[in-house]
Structure formats: structure tokens, C-alpha cells
Amino acid sequence: DTVIRIELAPLGITSRPDYIDFDSEKEILGEITESKSQDEWLAQMNFSGTYRQATEAMEQFLFMLDNSAIKEAVIKRLDDPFWGTRRAALNLLSSQGEDVSADLEAKLINIAQHDKRASNRLDAYSLVSNNTGSIDYYGPGEEHLVAEKKQKYISLFTQGLKDSSYSVQENCLGHLSN
């Protein structure tokens, strides 16, 4: 293994940049190992322009969505024009299994109803479905809370039964039948 160390000459910048991508086009043949702080990974997720850069940063935060800045950056990626970046953000959010805020709920419903990719619609429906909770989540004697949350989404999941994707239809049918 050959290790090449590169030192960068000062560029006359008065403050330290939040984010530098050494090989943004991923053209260097070889493995690049970067040591970045959490703030630098967060800046990469916020400012990166490519799928690869965004998902690379998201992978660093797999178990860190309890940090509000990280969660906010992931939720912001749900608006990305590239379907793969939206899918990576949905997967990261679904891996956490936490309650969905009103802002996130609106984005998930929009994706479920309008995303061009069936896989993204399915993931959004699944996240909304998981947000309704279960008896185990609320505890004994609080069954009415589960019923109230499920009632809130009936029209959304009924609309999903008309989706062109059988996977989406199956998810919606499963939600409505429980």
C-alpha cells in the first residue's frame, strides 16, 4: 500500500471552510480515507451537490438522528431533485423508528402521493404507517390513541390503493386492514 500525503498551500482564505470535497467527481482511482468531524460531515450533507456526496455523509449519521441539526439536514434531503438521495434519506429516517413531526409528516405525505418512484412512495407510506404506533407503543388502556392516529390516515391509505405499484397497494391495504 502506498500512502500519499497531500498538503494544501494557503489560499488566502480568512476563515476555515465548512466543507471541502477532495475528489468531488470521484475520478481518482484508489481509496481515499477522509477524517472529518461531525460538523464537516453535516456540512457535506447540507452543501453537497451529488448523490454520492450526500449519501456518503448520511451513512455517517446512521444512529445520530437524535441530534436535531442532523435530523433537520436529513429531512431537507427529502426535497432533493434526485430520487436516490430522497430514497437514502427515507431509509435513514425509517431505520430510526421514531415519532414523526408535523413538518416531516407533510413531506412524507407529499412523497407518498406524488413521487415518481414507486420505491420512494412505498418508503414514505411505510414511515407514515409506522408512525401510527401500536398497542405496545402506547401501552395498555390507550388503544383509543392508536385508533385515532389510524383514523387520521385512512384517506391517505385509501388513495394509495389506487397507486400503480403493487407494493404500495399492498402496504396501504395492510395498514387499512389492521
Image (cartoon, grey):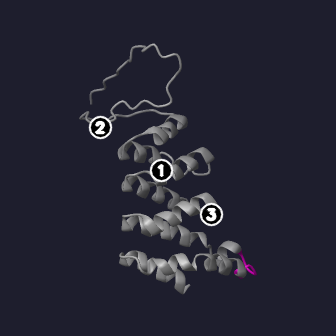
Residue shown at 70% from the left, 77% from the top: 145
Q: Position of residue 19 (x, y in %)?
A: 46, 31
Q: Which mark is residue 99?
A: 3
For disc 1, the marked residue is 77
Q: Position of residue 52 (x, y in %)?
A: 36, 45
- Nearest to the observer: residue 96 or residue 146: 146
Q: Quadrant of residue 129?
A: bottom right
Q: Please state, as top left, top right, bottom left or bottom right, where the C terminus lies in the image.
A: bottom right
* Magenta part of the chain: 139-143
For disc 2, the marked residue is 26
Mark yes or no: residue 101 visible: no
- Separation (CA) of disc 3 from disc 1: 18 Å
Q: Amino acid at mark 2?
A: Lys
Eyeballing the image, is 52 above or below 33?
A: below
Q: Amino acid at mark 3?
A: Asp
Q: Quadrant of residue 49?
A: top left
Q: Please state, as top left, top right, bottom left or bottom right, where the N terminus lies in the image.
A: top left
Marks 1 & 2, CB-CB < 8 Å contact: no
Eyeballing the image, is 135 above or below 47?
A: below
- Separation (CA) of disc 3 from disc 2: 36 Å
Q: Position of residue 24 (x, y in %)?
A: 34, 35
